Amino acid sequence: MIIKDNLSNGGKFLGSNDDYYKSEIVIVGAPMDYTVSFKPGTRFGPQAIRMASLGLEEYSVYLDRSLKDKKYYDYGDLILPYGNVEKCLNIIGDAAKDIIDAGKKPIFLGGEHLISAPILEKVFKKYGNELVVLHFDAHTDLRTEFFGERDSHATVLRIASEFVNKKNMYHFGIRSGVKEEFVFAFKNTNMFLYDVVEPLKSILDNIKSKPIYITWDIDVLDPAFAPGTGTPEPGGITSKEALSAIHMLKDLNVVGMDLVEVSPDYDHSGITSILAAKLIRESILSFL
């Protein structure tokens, strides 16, 4: 397997079992932060999330469900060649393909948001035009290029729009971007500014029968709740709203997800990492 040849050892997410083959969900870290536009450091996000997860309970009082009843495996972090963006994206895409081809659901821990592009490409090849993408973010990430580069954490959803059905792309919590991105989004996709819970509630009936991929940029939350990120953007949602959004997707056909842009060097109290870990726990118990 390609994924097995590109992994480093590290800690495991809370409750991870020891058998990849019997698992239904696979967690993989993608510690890449080579195109970040402000403060670097998200390559350390996956391990910080794992370490923080050990401070959580396996039981969710929100859902009356426990991780003990879920079959998931943490495969560790991918080994990514420093500075070689193209090769990194190929390795991430190959890892996603391995997981999907094995009939399992991937959870990728970033790392910068660009890691979502190759994952989404492989998920789309599996599920086709019915695939729905739910994008939770402070930023549009719909630029055609950033500082002359097509591959950037600021272009990732524009890249995805080249193959995903644009009408099946939904953006939530957005409050930053250049005007051209918003013009593109409102014309071609489903753009919801500032808020998450009410807009998500309004589209549930439209997506409940479709395969869904979720991409969470931690900066969708206000920096008061998630300061540990490279591009903090004031005016975001609360941690309670983020959890509510996850719980609203309970039992829908979510086929994979990623959570990106956690940067522990700017998270001295650890609240961003523990929040990210809790969002992962609730996601596993809600819909994966």
Image (cartoon, grey):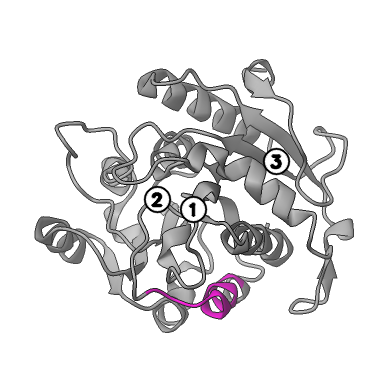
Mark-to-mark CA distance, 2 and 1: 8 Å
State which quadrant residue 96 falls in: top right
Is the Cβ of the residue at disc 2 closer than 8 Å to that at disc 1? yes
Q: Amino acid at mark 1?
A: Tyr
Q: Is residue 240 rendered magenta in the image?
A: yes
The crowd level at tag 2 (other Cα within 10 Å; few <14, some 14-19, many 20+) is many
**Disc sitting over residue 36 in the figure:** none
State which quadrant residue 109 falls in: top right
- Residue that badge 1 annotates: 266
Magenta span: predominant SS is helix
Residue 28, horizontal then vertical, whole percent: 64, 37
Q: Is residue 120 above or below residue 179?
A: above
Q: Nearer the viewer, residue 103 or 25?
A: 25
Mark-to-mark CA distance, 3 and 2: 26 Å
Residue 238, horizontal then vertical, whole percent: 50, 77
Give the structural element (helix, strand or loop) at label 3.
Answer: strand
Q: Nearer the viewer, residue 206 or 120?
A: 120
State which quadrant residue 121 falls in: top left
Task: Provide the residue span drawn in magenta.
Answer: 236-246
